[in-house]
Image: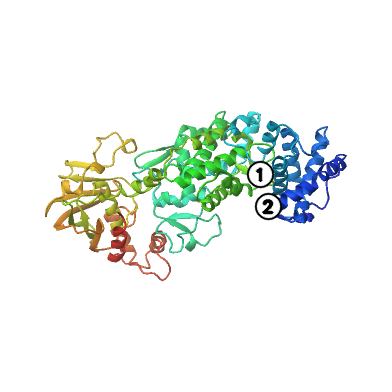
Amino acid sequence: MAKKTDRSAKDSKMTSVGELRASRAVDAVVPAFVQWCQDSHGMPADAAMEYLNPVKDVAAAYFELVPSSVATAFDAEPFGTVLGKVYAAYDNASTGSDNAVMFVFEAVHLYVEFLERAGMWTGTEAEYDAVHSLFHVSEENAGAQLEVPQLTANDELAFYEGTELVHYLENFLHWLGKGREVTSTGLLRLKEIEGAASAIGLRARGGRPLRDQRWEKPSRDPNQPDAEVYAVLSMNGLDELMKFWVTLEACHLVQVGPTRVRPTAFAEELLETGHPGRLGILRSFVSKFLEISVHGESHWSMLFQDVALVQSILLLDICHPGGFTMGYIPELVANIGLKAVDPIIDIVTERTHEMARLGLLTLEPVIQVLPPLVPFIPSLLEYAKNRPEGDDEWEGLAGIDAIGGPAPKASPQTRLLQVKIMLKDSKPPVWRRLLVRNDLNLAQLHHIIQRAFGWMNCHLHEFRVGGYNGTAYGPVGDDFDFGDQMPIDEASIKVGQILSQEKDKIGYTYDFGDNWEHSIAVENVLEYRGGPAARCTGGRGAGPAEDSGGVWGWENIVAIMTQPTHPEYQEYRDWLGIEEGEAFDPKSFDEDGVDEILSELF
């Protein structure tokens, strides 16, 4: 809590006919307020007196609006109106100080709480609750108190068109043109990522990540040196682009096919100047983007469930008169009583700034929601309040999705299979020798192979026994239903059911576009004496880069990388993320590094 503010932030005080009445009304409670501040907050008397200055300004403006001269009871609606005006006055006179508005918020909020807790509130309990809700709207009554702005269609359209979000939407659809290439999992291919990211203001590209970017984020600086551009091995690595992409699909603005993504008729209508359907399309897109931004990550992490709850309440609170500053976020988190306080505050603060940058919120002098979005806010809180409970269950989902589930408890029948996995037709040869428990399922084996070869799990895959017309095993469910016969669920089959003795074999294909085919053969069956469920004991060759065109495309890239004078040499260096002074070695293989990754997997 701030103890003191720079009164130069408001050098010219409000002058009104109610100023004298306000001063007298507030002066009447000065001794009690000062004593309460000392007893409750350990606040010095001079700091408490400083807090009363904006209280007098609010009271003066209130008395001008309402026929009253009592500073111990207020009507919420006019009080909220004058509170917003005082925020603005302090902000305008602050000469650049970010603390001015926050000081007003803290001071008036503290004064209202003092009136109630010291027994000096002279209005009704309902009147106090209404005034106090201007500083924090509770989950239970927030939706009922919400007043939805009445806008004409032209005003609503103008609001949307003035946002950076809609500007990005139009940029993206223009970039998309007649269509772009996608992977078999429906994401943009690496070569398309740079253009897509640029359309929404990001400097990013597909390729091997830079060494120092782990804790960094993509830049929006158009002048950033190319050598420092954020790189990802999959579109999944760009959160902002993924939110945008998911919203496009949800609003039927794009249609993702097996190999290409194309704009729909709705996208064409949106880009047509003056089209009567434009407002409805923008309303759908902006509201859906807001929903995904708040709740998109809440399904797999308890932390993000709590983040979504805080953000939903914050958005609802800032729809009401009066408004809040950014300093309200830590207070809100504290009031709700959540764990992991600091990370939640940081994430909500970052998201709030991002929404403001996109034009969905304003931050100065107080945080406010874009008026057309107000009707959509209550449903965000309703969703957050009804989220599934249970920390262990929800925290475990992320790990299950990532590696196919935990390893089962070993039994006397558990064995280690020594397998050699060869990338077919690879030149130079690429292979891995692994030790894998026979009681793991094929879904877990898939994730082991992904890490062993450096793949990013960005594409579809399958296991197959008996060649092309043999039995197929793979992921099942609605997300993998493309009209073909569904494979047997790989998560239901143990590795040992198919690979049980020496010379047993199974095929594994990753990315049905590049068609990375692997042969998996059992070399030995060993006793399991405890330890990791998967290990690496040998191998050769660097795993080919994602989306490099299959073994022949990769072979071509390797050939180019041996010719520094080749016209595409530098382009491929950049695409592969090879830094200056670093050599490219297609034969490189870090056995210890792979073994460490696998040993920690289960």
Q: Position of residue 291 (x, y in %)?
A: 51, 38
Residue 127 appears in the figure:
yes
Query: Would you say 228 lies left or right of 30 here?
Result: left
Point out which mark residue 41 bears.
2
Q: For the residue labelled by badge 2, is the local secondary structure a helix, a strand or a loop?
A: helix
The residue that disc 1 covers is 324
- Relative to 159, is 544 above or below? below
* Callout 2 amino acid: His
Is residue 272 visible to the viewer in this orientation of the structure?
no
Q: Position of residue 538 (x, y in %)?
A: 22, 64
Q: Quadrant of residue 425?
A: bottom left
Q: Is residue 379 above or below residue 224?
A: above
Q: Position of residue 279 (x, y in %)?
A: 57, 31
Tell me the crowding category of disc 2: few under 14, some 14 to 19, or many 20 or more residues within 10 angstroms, Cα based. Answer: few
User: In front: mark 1 or mark 2?
Assistant: 2
- Point out the image quarter for the C terminus: bottom left
Question: Would you place residue 154 above or below residue 309 in this image?
Answer: above
Mark 1 burial class by Cα count in 10 Å: few <14, some 14-19, many 20+:
many
At 33% from the left edge and 44% from the top edge, which residue is drawn? 184
Looking at the image, residue 554 sits to the left or right of residue 107; the answer is: left
- Residue 488, by quadrant, is top left
User: In screen coordinates, is 600 left or right of 410?
Assistant: right
Amino acid type, callout 1: Phe
In this figure, which colouring scheme has been used for the structure? rainbow
- Tell me the CA gap for discs 1 and 2: 22 Å
1 or 2: tag closer to the N-terminus: 2
How many numbered marks are there? Answer: 2
